[in-house]
Amino acid sequence: MNDIDGLYEVMSNPQVHQFTKDKNHPWDRLKTEQYIQFFIDRNFVSLDCFHGAIIEKSSNKLIGLAGLNPYKENEPEIEWKLGVTYWNKGYATEIGKEIISEAFKTTNITGIYGMAEPENIASRRVLQKIGMKYLGINEFRDQKDAFYYIGRLGL
């Protein structure tokens, strides 16, 4: 299986998107290829905005994606999506902590936001486990989301 097949396997599952803006539009193969090409073309050189593959160490299998999206100046949004069979195994917490640590070490960002649908208890729990503080419910991408934040001094 190649990287496109692995990411497509994860992103084509409707459960992966049940709490995202793509909840009614699971990814097809073309959208998966376009996503990969977009980030290849970005040629990231810093961690203030990036997406990358999550690779399971024991199997060397692509199990999801994670990264930082532009949100506010010097304050990106953290994001991850994992294949359903990898939920509740600590992967999101592990990758979230690492993204925060590396981003603050290697960039000049001042903070990182995290957003989750209020009903997405699992993601909200991960945001708390990675050190983010709950800010309340706010509008984000035309829906109400629970907002979390960690600042550089919060480490």
Image (cartoon, rainbow, N blue to C red):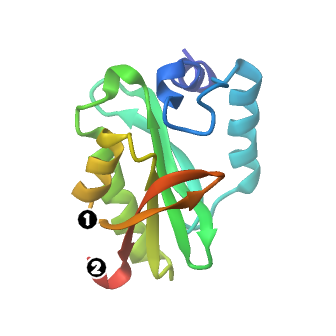
Q: Residue at x 22, y 55 (%)?
A: 129
Total tally of numbered discs in the picture: 2
Q: Type of residue at label 1?
A: Gly
Q: Is residue 128 left or right of residue 15?
A: left
Task: Please tell me which residue lies in front, 71 or 119.
Answer: 119
Image-quadrant location for residue 98: bottom left
Identify whether 76 is placed above or below 68: below
Q: Nearer the viewer, residue 143 or 41?
A: 143
Local packing at callout 1 (Cα closer than 10 Å; few below 14, some 14-19, many 20+) is some
Write the residue at 50% across / 29% down.
Answer: 18
Percent across and percent down for residue 122 are 30, 40
**Residue 101's spot in the image, x, y percent?**
34, 67
Label 1 element class: loop
Labels 1 & 2 near each other (Cβ < 8 A): yes
Query: Which of the image's four quarters has the C terminus?
Result: bottom left
- Residue 32 drawn at (x, y percent): 68, 28
**140 or 10, which is in the foreground?**
140
Residue drawn where x is 71% and y is 19% of the image: 29
Q: Is residue 13 left or right of residue 125?
A: right
Residue 131, numbered circle = 1
Residue 154 tag number: 2
Up the image or down, 154 lies above or below 28; here it is: below
Sequence-wise, the earlier of marks 1 and 2 is 1
Identify whether 70 is placed above or below 119: below
How packed is label 2: few (under 14 Cα within 10 Å), some, or many (20 or more)?
few
Amino acid at the residue labelled 2? Gly
Tell whether 73 sits left or right of 136. Answer: right
| Most distant residue in the top direction | 1
Residue 144 image offset from top left, x and y in percent? 53, 53
Secondary structure type for disc 2: helix
